């Protein structure tokens, strides 16, 4: 179901991009916008692991330095049919974790020092299984493609607003300006909402995969309850909105209307789905 949702949302982003491109910039404008967005996201995709690991001061650890963590990642990777990723520890007491890397052969799993002291080995296996599922599903690539289309739509919308502003000032032009302004704003907002929906659907898939790799949905469900509670008590103050979607639980909280832009489903919903799983 969540794979189908991802496909549907990706198709919706593509349709929105093509429609807006033909409406505002024509085929040439759409191609230019897509090239600009692709270039912007290519660097992020290729170097995402180095950038985010450096951003959070993650330290690589060897089997000798963190044997329990290393062996757990090794065992789960073998169970998932993945190459052994690099293992990192982030010196931060806020409990969280993420995976990064452009493909399974260039993957890294990072955990905070806080999550290591909070979770039991079983709970940690659920979290690591979730992150390894992101690697297996190549979610960094999917997220980059979604971001590219959303970025291209944003570029088109910006081009449209500039064109409307400098395109003339008569009555008809004023009317067209309002139409273009509304269309460009709505399209940009719709693209962002679709991008966030894709992110949430990938989280559900990673939860399912994490439960299977760890061997018990209860492990991840219990971990998520703890992470939700303790991440609020010990906030990840250095977390960046641009990377918040990578973590097992969002280090940034959002409620109300802002909840529409969440990169993660609600923890209660994730736990409920895990509790309903049977392996």
Image: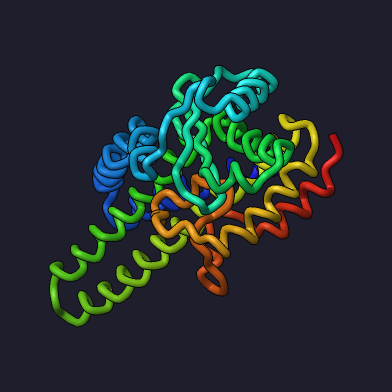
Can you give x and y, in whole percent of width and height, for residue 91 in the image? Answer: 44, 44
Please tell me how many numbered marks the rendered image carries: 0
Q: Quadrant of residue 47?
A: top left
Q: Is residue 183 left or right of residue 264?
A: left
- Of residues 119 and 76, the one nearer the viewer is 119
Q: Is residue 107 above or below residue 8?
A: above
The quadrant of the rendering that contains the C terminus is top right
Q: Nearer the viewer, residue 179 or 220?
A: 220
Residue 269, horizontal then vertical, whole percent:
72, 57
Give left or right: position of 100 versus 78.
Answer: left
Can you name the residue that lies furthest to the bottom here? Answer: 171
Residue 20 appears left or right of 32:
right
Give residue 212's position: percent from left, percent from top. Answer: 75, 32
- Picture residue at 30% right of the left edge, 59% below the top: 157
The residue under the point 34% across, 30% down is 46
Of residues 117 and 249, the one nearer the viewer is 117
Position in image of residue 13 (x %, y %): 47, 49
Colour scheme employed for the rendering of this structure: rainbow
Q: Quadrant of the N terminus?
A: top right
* Residue shown at 58% from the left, 41% from the top: 7
Which residue is pictured at 65% across the width and 33% down the height?
129
């Amino acid at each position: 179901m969540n794979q189908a949702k991802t496909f549907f949302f990706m198709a919706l982003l593509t349709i929105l991009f093509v429609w807006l491109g033909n409406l505002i910039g024509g085929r040439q404008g759409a191609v230019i916008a897509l090239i600009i967005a692709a270039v912007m996201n290519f660097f992020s995709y290729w170097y995402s692991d180095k950038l985010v690991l450096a951003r959070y001061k993650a330290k690589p650890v060897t089997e000798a330095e963190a044997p329990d963590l290393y062996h757990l990642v090794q065992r789960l990777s073998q169970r998932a049919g993945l190459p052994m990723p690099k293992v990192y520890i982030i010196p931060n007491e806020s409990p969280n974790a993420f995976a990064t890397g452009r493909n399974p052969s260039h993957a890294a799993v990072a955990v905070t020092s806080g999550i290591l002291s909070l979770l039991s080995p079983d709970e940690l296996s659920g979290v690591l299984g979730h992150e390894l599922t992101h690697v297996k599903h190549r979610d960094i690539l999917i997220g980059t493609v979604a971001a590219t289309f959303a970025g291209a739509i944003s570029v088109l919308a910006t081009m449209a607003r500039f064109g409307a502003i400098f395109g003339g000032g008569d009555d008809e032009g004023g009317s067209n300006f309002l139409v273009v302004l509304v269309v460009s704003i709505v399209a940009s907002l719709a693209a962002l909402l679709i991008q966030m929906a894709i992110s949430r659907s990938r989280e559900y898939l990673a939860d399912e995969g994490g439960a299977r790799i760890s061997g018990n949905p209860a492990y991840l469900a219990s971990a998520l309850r703890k992470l939700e509670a303790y991440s609020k008590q010990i906030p990840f103050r250095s977390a960046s909105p641009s990377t918040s979607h990578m973590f097992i639980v969002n280090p940034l909280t959002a409620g109300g209307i802002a909840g529409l832009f969440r990169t993660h489903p609600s923890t209660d919903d994730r736990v409920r789905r895990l509790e309903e799983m049977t392996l």
